[in-house]
Amino acid sequence: VQLVESGGGLVQAGSSLRLACAGSGIAFSIASMAWHRQIPGKQRELVASIILGGGSTNYADSVKGRFTISRDNFKNTMYLQMNSLKPEDTAVYYCRMVLIIKGKPYVYWGQGTQVTVSS
């Protein structure tokens, strides 16, 4: 299983970016998908998540109303649409998938993609 993020970059405040996370080698059930971010010296924080079973989503308070998580089941790909970006959104963004293999959950992470928002 391999997760590859793309879509990061350097943008100005108020701009939009869409991150993508493409999963390969996934022949198992995906239980959940999520995006996290990390600033150097700080803990990785959850940005948004989606439970595939019921489709429920969850967002960090700091991104509610600005970010949207979505998925394309046929492509095993997840997205994070980020609008009205702020300098404090600057971080490395990681995607995470939880797969169910023989009844047990396994967590996989992408390598991260840098998002930099200038003021």
Image (spheres, helix red, strand yellow):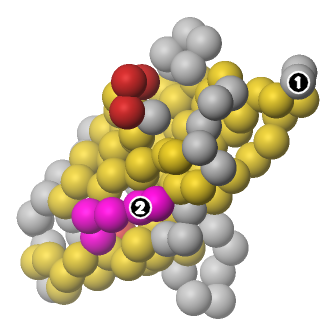
**Does the magenta segment cover residue 6?**
yes
Q: Is residue 22 left or right of residue 42?
A: left
Majority SS type along the magenta span:
strand
State whether residue 37 appears in this view. Answer: no
Please name the residue shown 56% across and 62% down the image.
Answer: 110
Give, as a single range, the part of the protein colored magenta.
Answer: 4-8
For label 2, the SS is strand
Q: Which is more toward the observer, 48 or 72? A: 72
Q: Nearer the viewer, mark 2 or mark 1?
A: 1
Three-letter amino acid code at the position of disc 1: Lys
Q: Is residue 52 left or right of residue 91?
A: right
Residue 102: assigned label: 1
Please name the residue shown 46% across and 66% down the image.
Answer: 93
Please name the residue shown 33% across and 63% down the image.
Answer: 6
- Quadrant location of the C terminus? bottom left
State whether residue 78 appears in this view. Answer: yes
Residue 5: assigned label: 2
Residue 15: assigned label: none
Local crowd size for mark 2, using a 10 Å CA cut-off: few (<14), some (14–19), many (≥20)? many
Please name the residue shown 69% across and 38% down the image.
Answer: 98
Give residue 24's position: percent from left, percent from top.
Answer: 52, 46
The image quadrant of residue 71 is top left
Give residue 10's position: percent from left, percent from top.
Answer: 20, 81
The image quadrant of residue 31 is top right
Three-letter amino acid code at the position of disc 2: Glu
